[in-house]
Amino acid sequence: MDANTALNLVTLAISVTALTMTARLTRRQIQVASDANLVPVVINAFQETRSPAWFEAQEYILSRLAEEHAADLGHRGLPLPARTHANTIGLFYDDLGKLVVHGVIDQRLVIGAYGTTIVRLWDVLAPYIYAERQTHGLHFWVYFEDLATRTADMHPDVVYATMRRRPPQPEVR
């Protein structure tokens, strides 16, 4: 091989390496920018689930909804206060489920944060949701259902097992 051919091959190798590195860096920058856009979404979700209205809705659904209202009424058949509580929970988890299904946020974050409460709430609301679907032929809260299924399939303990632990430290005197 002559000197010109060798020089051309070295130049080509450097160019291909530079192009590959540029593509990787660009992909990483896009990912970082995308992740930065998600931070407000996640923080907003966490804040919503710490409001008094959230706790009231959750407590109502888990302790009183099924006792006070027949599931065959469906979602629309619930009286306004009960429907409002159902919407507080159902719409939130349906929207969160959309983000998980479409790969916007990692399901481990959601499952680790909300745990089996997702499944417990789904199990209470499911008969009302299925009645709503049957009556009105809608795909009502399908993302919430998917999220509950994912949570049942991946127990939060699986998420927590990847976390580091720090046992209590002895007091220094």
Image (spheres, rainbow, N blue to C red):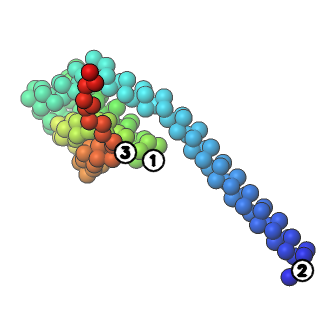
Name the residue nearer the viewer: 154 or 10: 10
- The dot on residue 107 is 3
For this orientation, the residue located farthest to the bottom is: 1
Q: Nearer the viewer, mark 2 or mark 3?
A: 2
| Classed neighbour count for the residue bearing mark 3: other residues with Cα under 10 Å, few (<14), some (14–19), many (≥20) | many
Side of 147 relative to 131 (left or right)? right
What amino acid is at disc 2?
Answer: Asp
- Distance (Cα) linking label 1 and label 2: 52 Å
What residue did someone put label 2 on? 2
Mark 2 or 3, nearer chain start: 2
Q: Please indicate, yes or no, whether residue 132 appears anywhere in the rendered image.
A: no
Name the residue nearer the viewer: 63 or 131: 63
Residue 2 in the image, given as x and y percentages of width and height: 90, 80
Q: Are marks 3 and 1 in contact (CB under 8 Å)?
A: no
Mark 1 or 2, nearer chain start: 2
What residue did someone put label 1 on? 103
Residue 9 in the image, given as x and y percentages of width and height: 81, 71
- Distance (Cα) linking label 2 and label 3: 57 Å
What amino acid is at disc 3?
Answer: Gln
